[in-house]
Amino acid sequence: DAFINFSECLRQLRTHSTANGPKIYKPAMLSVVIDAIEDGELVANQFEFDAMESRFRERLQQLGVEPKAEYAVEAFFHLSGDLFWMLCYHDAKQCITDTPSAKGLRERVRFAKLNETFWRLMQIPVYRRQAKEVLAEAWWPERQTLLPLKGVVQSIPAQSTPQQGPDYSLA
């Protein structure tokens, strides 16, 4: 099931840890992308850094994390290492290999996008709601009351191991 694969990707984001636990920049960026889809602000699978930055900083503040500008750059850029978030460059010959400055990111990256199957899943309200719940449970369980989820959410298995390779179909 495509959503089970996506939820596992959300749970297993590669993040750095500090003395206070894992950095939550990447899950916070994904949560604001999902919110922007839900609010009708993202109608195409293209997320510009500037459009996500203020939402991201607001989300960090809601989660009790100092909303520094460089955290948005780190999340936007490093999500590409999780292989379902792709950066689309102005010039494919000028790819970024190390964490850029905000200016460098804006100059080289046109937008980011999700894997097409995962993007299609996020067009379905129940999957958006479930994805936000997975992010909250996995990355900020002690802060869930700060970001209340509305509506009824179906349960999602905590661990799932497909017997065969991943199925990215929506059928």
Image (cartoon, grey):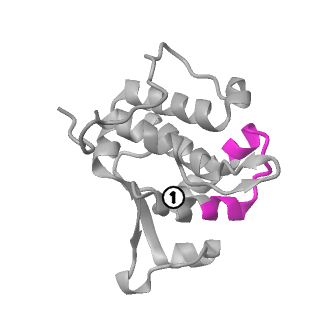
Quarter holding residue 103: bottom right
Magenta part of the chain? 58-74
Q: Is residue 119 above or below residue 16?
A: above
For badge 1, the amino acid type reads: Leu
Q: Which quadrant of the rendered structure holds the N terminus?
A: top left
Residue drawn at point x = 39 percent, y = 29 percent: 127
SS assignment at label 1? helix
Q: Is disc 1 surrounded by few (<14), some (14 to 19) or many (20+) residues within 10 Å? A: many
* Prevalent SS, magenta region: helix
Residue 64 belongs to the span the image colors magenta = yes
Q: Which quadrant of the rendered structure holds the C terminus?
A: top left
Residue holding disc 1: 79
Residue that extends furthest to the left in the rendered view of this protein = 171
Report whether residue 74 is seen.
yes
Quarter holding residue 90: bottom left
Q: Is 124 or 140 nearer to us in this picture?
A: 140
Q: Is residue 79 left or right of residue 145?
A: left
Report whether residue 40 is seen.
no
Residue that extends furthest to the top in the rendered view of this protein = 152
Where is residue 36 drawn, in percent x and y?
Answer: 49, 42
Q: Is residue 75 left or right of residue 33?
A: right
Where is residue 123 drawn, in percent x and y?
Answer: 34, 36
Residue drawn at point x = 53 percent, y = 55 percent: 51
Residue drawn at point x = 52 percent, y = 40 percent: 11
Q: Is 149 or 160 nearer to us in this picture?
A: 160
Where is residue 131 drawn, in percent x and y?
Answer: 47, 33
